[in-house]
Image (tube, rainbow, N blue to C red):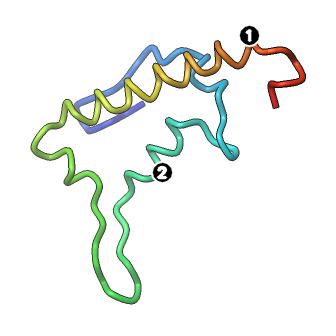
Amino acid sequence: MHVTPTVTLRGIPDAAHAYVVNGRTPLEWAVDRLHIRRDKESGIVNDPNAWFAADPAGLVSHLRRLVYVSVETACIVEGLPPALRD
């Protein structure tokens, strides 16, 4: 996964993709929210990338936490009785 032109995350475990919320993994939700958007009516630009401009490592830390929580949640859900998994 390319975070910036110079930063690439590798080794994301498959289990990070096992936990899905409303059709997407938490990592997919986060990546979707990182797109620059301009409100059509107000013209206000929402640039989430600017949030991490002062601390680029903050974005990597954020994504790493999402991967960790996804993997741990998938393990917990897998340990539940089948009737409680869905």
Q: Nearer the viewer, residue 84 or 68?
A: 84
Please state the horizontal and vertical placement of residue 44, each as a whole percent of the image.
Answer: 28, 78
Please state the horizontal and vertical placement of residue 52, each as a whole percent of the image.
Answer: 20, 44
- 35 to 16, vertically: above or below: below
Identify the mark at residue 79; answer none if there is no mark. 1
Please state the horizontal and vertical placement of residue 15, each as a whole percent of the image.
Answer: 61, 17
- 43 to 58, vertically: above or below: below
Quick check: 85 left or right of 34?
right
Point 60% across, 17% down: residue: 14
Mark 2, residue position:
32
Q: Are marks 2 and 1 in contact (CB under 8 Å)?
A: no
Label 2 residue SS: helix
Point 22% across, 32% down: residue: 6
* Residue furthest left in the image: 54
Point 74% across, 10% down: residue: 79
Quadrant of the image containing the C terminus = top right
Identify the mark at residue 24; answer none if there is no mark. none
Please state the horizontal and vertical placement of residue 27, each as a whole percent of the image.
Answer: 50, 35
Q: Amino acid at mark 1?
A: Gly
Point 38% across, 31% down: residue: 63
Q: Amino acid at mark 2?
A: Asp
* Residue furthest bottom in the image: 41
Of the two numbered discs 2 and 1 in the rendering, the one whose residue sits closer to the viewer? 1
